[in-house]
Amino acid sequence: GIHPSIPGGEGGIAPLQLYADVVFDRPLDQAWTYGVPEHLVGLVGVGKRVAVPLGKGSRETSGFCVGLRETGPPASIQVKPVLRVLDDEALVDEHLLQLTRWMAEYYLCGWGQVLHAVVPAGVREQAGTREVAVVEVPPAAEQPEPFPALTAQQRAVWELVRDSGGAMELRDLLRQGRCSAAVVQGLVKKGLLRRYRRRVERAEVQEAVAEAAEPPLLGSREEPRIVLNGDQQRVWGQLEAALQVGGFQPFLLHGVTGSGKTEIYLRAMEAVVRQGRQVIVLVPEIALTPQTIARFRQRGNRVAVLHSHLTDAERGAHWRRIAAGEVEVVVGARSAIFAPARKLGLIVIDEEHEHTFKQEATPRYHARDVAVMRARLAGVPVVLGSATPSLESWWNAARGHYTLLSLPKRVEARPLPQVRIIDLRHEPNKGGAISMTLAAAMERALRQGGQVLLLLNRRGYSTYVHCSSCGHVAQCSHCDIALTFHRCRNALLCHYCGWETAPYQRCPACGQASIRYQGLGTEKLQAEIAEKFPGYVCVRMDSDTTSRRGSHEGILEAFRTGKIQILLGTQMIAKGLDFPNVTLVGVINADVGLHVPDFRSAERTFQLLAQVAGRAGRGDKGGVVYIQTFTPDHPCIALAARHDYVTFAGQELAQRRQHRYPPFEHLARLIIRSEEEAAAAQFAQTLAGALQRAAAVVDRQSREGGTAPPGELPGPPPPLRILGPAECPIYRLNNYYRFHFQVQSPDRGRLQNVLRRVLGTVRPPAAVEFQIDMDPYSM
Ligand code: ADP
Ligand code: ZN
């Protein structure tokens, strides 16, 4: 073995071996230990990446160093050496290490996987500053004579630098010269080399830096200083006190649409920035909240906006500026929660109920939950804001885990818009999607110079295509999904995998020319409006019309300036927009998301209706909302029409409790998928057995464990519930056959223990993929 001493001692210190714990971008739950050779001591560091040999073939693999220690594993275990250190500076600090470790345990994936996912590629590929060694002695002195005192190695190193143009990055020099930092240091002492740090940045990175200092996106007028109303003062008072005291404190800010929540965030941001600290603000999606972003930019002088169109290099540049403290406010979608703000003073999550905060790929984290944990680790307040909080957060407030702050009224005594329900079962129908009642209301609103928003949460023209002779339905050839007809591209499209085919003239099954286009999408609605309201400009906003960078902003700007009178679209139009001239909002079919196999469907429908209704009547002219539905008595529709979130939440929580759904029990979904149907089915059976055995062990342990955990009723804990295996609601997706399980328990620890055991005992065969989704949002 190698026994290097740690440099810097005055001698007499016993030689020490140093060991590094390394984690990899793999679903492994443990760190691997490597020995640190002498020339890398001092270079290896926690939070940096290293190259090490891994596995049977000792393939060189990079991983994150997550710990350094002086005691290694028992002598019987052979320790391999660290080969190289890949970063000059730690990519993640102690807080982010703790946070990612918690995520790995909570979401049951590898710590290295989490680190790999949260550090942007632009940072991993190109660390911020590099140390450069430069030849100090002028070329005239290049003969070997001036260096009598050099060792052969020192001389070789010096020549290497000279021959590469007189300057070399230190890490390249160490690698190519196969020397330790001490050799270079010897040359520096002799005045033959000079060392300094230099930023290595490409042109596009500098652009990103310039972009961060850009003026606001929209509405460049200077906002007048707003005087807080009574409710806002009460809320702000509580928040201000928490910010002064410091320490972890979670708040749920429940305020109806237009009640002035954003104004509260802005005050809090300003207070934190004045303390010289940093703020992270999460929004559901940058492109959908341009006005909110503009307001953040107006108030903060150094705001980094992390939008989804950034290049890797731009993202990397933002990351380094945030870490260096050059940015005071970070605004972004879910991954911004990992921004390396070292002086974090506050986290804000706007529209905390939005499901875009849930990541649907490993690590399958929920940014709201990660945010609360990060605030706890950093010891700072966190504010979750919404007009329609998630039931998880509402329950946390109800049981005292979060402090509830509420803004029950709109600012300046503006009323919430009146909502009228149109019962499609009894509404006289002259064909088309827009009922006569709604059409008349639109006519009125438009004639009076108002603008109209229409929500239809389905894109395309016809949502299914079938043969009226034999009943054949056009299906995706890779998924169990009916194809949607898109007229603008004259194609049948799968909304799940993107597969596309030409529309049929004749039925592919029976050969008859009796193809019917059924079901309503945004394209068909747009055609109907063009016919019924020929004098007005109507624009469609859905993912088909907004795929280019800037196209959202373009449409919204045209709507704001009155060039568009009718804006129709999917749930995109329901988010965070503040257009005072919108006097009518119409919901074409409120039932679209209601009858799906998902225990959150009522919650989602309520949220969508409340959000879109909140777009009406934000100015002096007032506003009205029409909701078309076949199920007017469904609580989520009836209560949304009355703007009664509190009653809805109470009723829905009672339902959840009765059916043992979250937030009363914790849920994990296990997904098995394979392109080979039999392999998927067989592994599902294997997993079923493993789950039963693991559950039996864990249930027995917790019975024998005696005392119930705090907050739980005494007595034997209820057993884990395992549902499955069952075919997923969409059995075949993108050529994969899929099965799933639901595993649930009132005790999260017990649920995680079972799954950890299962992960430790079963490995899927090569043809099968197996994933765990903790707190799943899609079923
Ligand atoms: P929310 O985020 O709850 O929808 P906002 O903070 O966006 O509400 O406020 C809605 C509108 O009211 C904004 O245009 C904002 O500038 C304005 N506003 C906020 N607070 C006040 C206040 N106290 N007095 C007057 N206008 C206000
Ligand atoms: Zn498909």
Image (cartoon, rainbow, N blue to C red):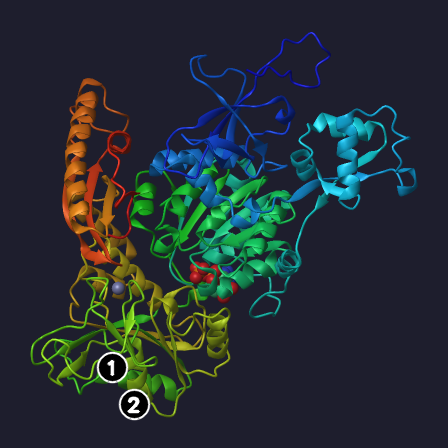
Name the residue nearer the viewer: 92 or 403.
92
Residue 137 vertical placement versus 606 (above, below):
above
**Front residue of 302 and 639:** 302
For label 2, the residue is 532
Percent position (x, y) of residue 453? 36, 76
Q: Secondary structure at mark 2?
A: helix
Check the image and report above or below for 70 versus 646: above
Mark 1 crowdedness (10 Å alpha carbons): few <14, some 14-19, many ≥20: many
Q: Residue furthest left?
A: 470
On screen, 362 above or below 689? Answer: below
Dot 2 or dot 1: first in sequence order is 1
Residue displayed at 82% across by 39% down: 135
Percent coordinates x, y for residue 754 in the rendering:
24, 31
Amino acid, disc 2: Lys
Q: CA distance from mark 2 to mark 1?
A: 9 Å
- Crowdedness near tag 2: few (<14), some (14–19) or many (≥20) residues, C-alpha within 10 Å: few
Tell me if residue 608 can be seen.
yes
Determine which residue is flagged by label 1: 434
For label 1, the SS is: loop
Residue drawn at (54%, 16%) of the image:
70
Q: Disc number at residue 206?
A: none
